[in-house]
Amino acid sequence: MSVRKRQEQRSDNVHLVAPGGNKYENDDKRETRDLRGDWGNIAILFFLYLLQGIPIGLAAAIPMLLQNRGASYKQQAEFSFAHWPFSMKLLWAPVVDSLYSSRFGRRKSWLIPTQYLIGIFMLILSVHVNRWLGSTNDDGLQAPNIPILTGIFFALNFLAATQDIAVDGWALTMLKRCNVGHASTCNSVGQTAGYFLGYVAFMALESAEFCNSYLRQEPSDEGLVTLPGFLWFWGLVFLITTTLIALLKREYLPSIERGHDEHLDLTIKEAYKLLVDIIKMKPILILTAILLTVKIAFSACDAVTSLKLIDAGVPKDKMALLVVPLVPLQIVLPLMISKYTSGPRPMDVYLKAIPYRIGLTLIAAAVVWFTPALIQNHHVPYYYYLILLANYGLYQIALYSMFVAVMAFFAKISDPAVGGTYMTLLNTLSNLGGNWPTTVVLWMVDVLTWKRCSTVADNACTDYAEKETCSENGGECNIAIDGYYIEIAICLVYGVLWYQWGKHKIRYLQNLPLDAWRVVQRQKGYSS
């Protein structure tokens, strides 16, 4: 589900809590934090991260809109590539860190052009988005233009990921050394707020049903907000705020007066060689295999369940609003779970959570199965939303147990000499391990699903043309075998088998001494 994807995507920015390794954490414990002079910087960082969350939230809302417009699961799989940039930003992060204009500012050299491009993309998208999403016109149903939508939102997320690299780096010098821990708070709260505005708030205000029920006295056929208007507004916000930052906010170099240490500047070649040296280590290779394969067991539930619920008649705005009650849970859970992952064996929690998460995928599939029987005449009873919320909440506990545990393990094993690069590499692998199964299972739903037109014998309803032919002949496309349940079964079997293999590998890695994870540095400027 989109909310789960967003939660696991946060791991990209965890290294901000301890940039450069554990050294900074120890420094913060000895220093007294003094926010005087940094309140304005904290507000700027919060707003920059909020802007970053807007395109991420919109990219999560588009699949819901496509599903209501009859998009196939293969098309959903194609669009899922739009979410990949945040899981691939390590590939170009060394370029962002190494190439810049000293006169304009190391971070502003990338921040300003990327935010201008995001604003321009949004303005262009606002003019054409309804046509590209597909709509009903005089000629019948117009199919969504998935390649263009995927390309545009991939570009938006690519730019947002590049902006994230720049803001992460700027946070380390924008704030005083004793206050740099607040950067992670700005990141988490700001990006979550932006995601909430781009996904939850937009989906609610775009829904005519929601607005008529709760926000209007006289009903209307449209919501209070349209997608073109939303994109136009935020496009202008990006352009205006970027101009103000470019003109009014000066970027300062690290200084002893502000408590900053000297940071090691790497060339592009040195940065990429460092990544290769880390990846070639045997423990990292084993951990890579684990990270890239573990989430296959949950992929069918995470990627397809919410779309199946919309197919069954659950309003998309109500699906989005289910995120709201979970926000307090998302805040409290990491604090509670961290008590059990702060010790020497954080991955014990990870292993204990896997069976529960696998079991909850079966419960989610059962909810999907019974949904058509529970929804009568497009009316969704309130107790049904309580069932969904309970399932979501229990799933959050299992998901966050794995998330917090693996982040604690990453922090434990990362080489302090190159902590930021090490953590970002592990986070990238973890996120890729969630993205590629999502794309595959979405693609395979239609392949594994068997449909038949009720009035045309040789019509399998595989594309828009066959669906329209069936409809013109007074028939309906009925599902004989639903590929979603086949995928749930495959993922269940895979999950059980993977657990038998993975638990031994994870315990082996957890028992290794910390020296086994250290990078042997032979280049000038590194220490092992």
Image: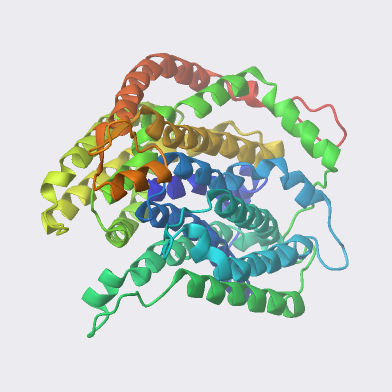
Q: Position of residue 193 (x, y in %)?
A: 46, 65
Q: Is residue 498 left or right of residue 380?
A: right
In which quadrant is the N terminus drawn? top left
Residue 170, x across and y down, in percent: 70, 61
The image shows residue 15, relative to residue 488, as above or below, that is below
Q: Residue at x 50, y 19 (%)?
A: 511
In the image, residue 67 above or below residue 299 = below
Decide if residue 334 is on the left or right side of residue 315: right
Horizontal relation, residue 355 to residue 202: left or right: left
Quadrant of the image occupied by residue 171: bottom right
Q: Is residue 313 left or right of residue 113?
A: left
Q: Position of residue 485 (x, y in %)?
A: 28, 30
Residue 492: image quadrant is: top left
Determine if residue 14 is in view: no
Residue at 61% across / 77% down in the picture?
A: 236
- Identify which residue, 73 or 14, lies in the foreground: 73
Q: Quadrant of the C terminus?
A: top right
